Amino acid sequence: MKINSKGLSNSEVVKSREEYGTNALVMVKKDSFFKQLIRSLGDPIIKILLIALGIKTVFLIQDFDWYETVGIVIAIFLASFISTISEYGSEKAFIKLQREAEAIKVKVRRDGKVLLIDINEVVVGDIILLDSGDRIVADGVLIKGEVSVDESSITGESKEVYKKPFISGLNPSDNNELLRGSVIYHGVGEMMVTKVGVNTFYGKISLELQEKQPESPLKLRLRDLAKVISRIGYVGAFLVAFSYLFSVLVINNNFDINRIVVTLSDTSLLFAYFLEALTLAVTIIVVSVPEGLPMMITLVLSSNMKRMLKDNVLVRKLMGIETAGSLNILFTDKTGTLTKGELEVVGVMFGNLDYYKEKKRLKSSITYYNILKKCILSNTNCVYDDEKKMWIGGNSTDKAVVNYLGEENYSVKKIKEVPFDSKNKYSYTKVIEENREITYYKGAPEVLLDRCKYYILPSGRSVPFVNKKRINDVIDEYAKKGIRVLMLGLDEGKGLSFISLLFIKDELREKVREGIELVRKAGIKTVMITGDNKVTAMSIARDAGIINSDRDVVLTSSELNRMSDDKVKEILPRLSVVARALPTDKSRLVRLSQELGLVVGMTGDGVNDAPALKKCDVGFSMGSGTEVAKEASDIVLLDNNFNSIVKAILYGRTIFKSIRKFIIFQLTVNFCAVFLSIVGPFIGVANPVTVIQMLWVNMVMDTLAGIAFSYEAPLLEYMEEPPKKRDEKILNSYMIHEIVFTSIYSFLLCIFFLKSPFIHSFFRNGKNDIYFMSAFFGLFIFMMIFNSFNARTSRLNIFANLLSNKVFLGVIIFIVIVQVILIYYGGDLFRTTSLSLKEIEIMLVCAFSVIPVEFLRKLYLKSKGKLGCV
C-alpha cells in the first residue's frame, strides 16, 4: 500500500473517483408519491364509504344516480390527493433540509495543502486529519498518531479501541484499521482512505443501520386522542343509524304496531331504509374520525423547518422540539453559546511580570517570542492553510492563540502528544529539539502553576520561581474582569518552568442577557456550566444576567462532588453556575433534576458531553461541535448561540399551540355534525348534509385546516407562559370549554336555521327545497370558516397577529372561492343551486354569529379571571 504524505493531486482525485466511486451512501428509499396516494385510499373510512356505495349501486341499480357514485369517487380521490401532496411534500422538504444542514465537513491533505471538503467528496487515497470527537467518514488505516476509537455503531461494543499507525510493508490489521461510522474518543492523527461509500463496511449495511425514527410522544398522544374520538364517532354513527331507523319505522308510523309490522314485511323498503341508515352512519364516521390529527405533526414541523433553519436551529429528533417547549431547567455551556466564541488574546505576561499587549512589541523580545512560538505551535491541533492564508481546525482557544502569532509555522519532531482533557485541564507535547527532549505544556493556571519550580528569564535561562504569589494575584485580577487565563510552561527534565500567561477575552453575544431574561420569564432556570475558574465564571454570569442576587449559588466541580445528592437537589433551584466543570458533573445534574420531576435541557459540543446529551430530555449540540455530540443531541444550534436555544423553546411552544388550535377547530365541527345527524331525524330532517357534501366538509376540517394552522407564527408572548407539564394532556380545560360551548351553539344554530319559520321566510320556496338546503350547506361551511378565526387565538381580538400567518388567509380565501363555486355550479352532485343576494346575506349573517357569541364567552371568562389559553 503506497502512502503519499502530501496527499493526492487533483488528477489523482479524479482518477480515484472514476475507479473506486464516490463516498455517498445509498439512502433508505422513501415511498413514492403514487404509493402514498394508494395507501391513503386504503384508509378504513374510505373503504367503508366505497363498500357502502358499492352495495347501494348493486341493489338500487334501477333508480340509482350513477353521477353521484362517480362524483363521490372523484371527491374521495381529490381528498386523498390533496392530503397526500401535503404530507409527501412536507416530508420530502423536511428530510432534504435535515440532510443539507447535517452535511459533515472533513480536513484532508491534497497536494501538500490542508482542505476542508464535504464527506461525499472524499476518495480512496485521501489523507484525512483526525481529531478528538471526529466521526470517521470512510474506511482506512491510521498512518500517523495514536487514537482511541468508539466502534459501537459498527460492532455494538461500547468500549474504547486503541489504534496505532500502520507500518509500511505489513498488511493492515485491526490495530490500525479505522471504519466509517466510528468516533475518535481521544488523540490526533492522520488516516489514509482505502474504501469509500457503499464499499465501506458501514456502506454495505447502511440500509439496515438507517433506523426509522420512532414516533414522538406528542404524535402518540395525538393518535391516542384520535382513537378516543373515533370511538365516540362510531357510537355516534350507531346512534344516527338507530335514530333514523326509529324515525322511519316508528315515528312515521305514529307508533302504530300494525303499521310498523307492515313496513317491516316490505323487504325492499326495509332494505332501502337500512341502506340509508348505513350511508348516514358512514357519513358520521367520515366526519367524526379525526384522521388528520397524526398528520398535523408532519405539517407543523415541515412548515416550521425553513423558519427554524433561518434561525440556525436544526431539529434532528422530533421529540426534541416538542419537549423544548416544556423545559424547566437548562444547563448551558459558556464559550460560543453565551459568548461570541471569537476568542482573542489581549495580552501576554511572563514570569518576570513583563506584559506585552501587541505582538509587534513582543517580537522585539526575541527569546521570549521564540519560546512562546515553539510552545504554542507544537501544542495545537490547528493547521495553517497556505492557500487560504488562515488557520483551520482546532478548538476556539487553539485558534485564538495561533492567530495571535499570525502566519508563523514551526516544524519539529514530536515524540508524544496528549490532547487537552477536561479532567486534567491541560495538554502537552514532547518534542526533540536540538537533540534534547522538551515537553511543552498548555492549560489551566490553577493546575499547572503550583507545579512550576522555575520561570524563564528574557535570556531564556530558568531561575527559581519567586513571583508565584504576584502571578496568582494577576490571575485573580483578570478573572474578575471575565477574562480567561491560559498558562504555558516547559520541562527540560529538571521540572516545570513557567513561560507565560495568555489573557484571552471572549465577549458576550449580543442580546444574550435579553435571551436569558426571556427564558426566566418562561419559567425556565438557566445554569451556566463552564471550564473557567470560579471568579471568571461569576463575572460572566453576572454580565449575562444568570446571577441576579446573593442567594444564587456558584459551585466548582470539586465543591459539587463533595455534596450528597439530597444536598444538590436542595440547592438546585438556586444553582446558577458550575465552574471548572467536568462532563460527569453534567450527567449527575441531569439525573438529579429528572429525579425532581423537571424537564431538562443541556448543551454540549464534545465527545464527553454525549452521555449527558443522551440522558437529558432535550439535548442541544453546537454546530461547531463534534459529530458524536451532534449524534447524541435532539437539536443542533448551527450558530452555537444561546438565543437560538430561546428560539427552539419558542418554536416548541408554537408547534404545540398550533396543534391545539387545530384540535379546537376540528372537534367543534365533529361534535356539531354528530349532534345534528343524531337529532335531525327526530325533527324531520333526515339528511341535512349529503355524503358528498360531508366529504368536502371533511377535506376542509382535516387537510386544509391542518395546512392553515400549521403556519401559525411564533409569538414572544408564548414565552411569558409557564412551561407545560411533562405529561400534560393535549386537551386542557380552556379547550374543552370552547369546544363544548361552540359545538353546542353551532348545533343549535343549525337547528334554528332548519326549523325556524322566520329563517324560512327569507327563501323563495320556504323550507326543505333545493334553495334552502343549498343555503344550509353554505351555512355549515361558512360557520366553520368564521369559527376558524375564533380557534386560532384566545384573545378577544380575533384578528390579532392575523397577518403573520398569510397561509391561513390564503386557505380561507381558497375555501370561500370553492364554496361559492359549489353553491352556484355544484348542481345535483352537491345538491346545490344559485342563491339570491338576500338568501346569501341571511346565510352569512347566521354563520357570522359564531364570532360575537364566542366574543361574549371570552369576555365573560375574562371578567371572572378564567380566560385561559391553548
Image (spheres, grey):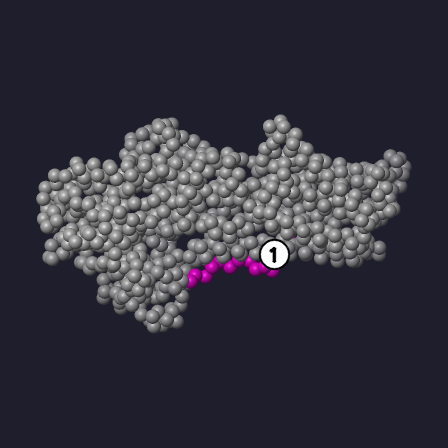
Q: Is residue 559 left or right of residue 450?
A: right
Closest to the observer, 235 or 288: 288
Q: Identify the residue at image location x=44%, y=37%.
A: 517
Looking at the picture, how far across and down is residue 70, in whole percent? 75, 58
- Image quarter in which the C terminus is found: top right
Q: Give the percent coordinates (x, y) of residue 763.
A: 84, 45
> Up-down: is 340 above or below 247?
below
Residue ID at (32%, 40%): 530
State the residue at coordinates (43%, 44%).
643
In percent of width and height, residue 856 lies at: 68, 33
Q: Nearer the viewer, residue 236 or 646?
A: 646
Of the pair 668 and 371, the residue shown nearer to us: 371
Residue range of the region highlighted in magenta in the rendering = 24-42
Name the residue rendered at 35%, 30% in the picture: 553
Task: Tell me, yes or no, whether the highlighted magenta stretch contains residue 32.
Answer: yes
Name the quadrant containing residue 735: top right
Which residue lies under the disc numbered 1?
A: 85
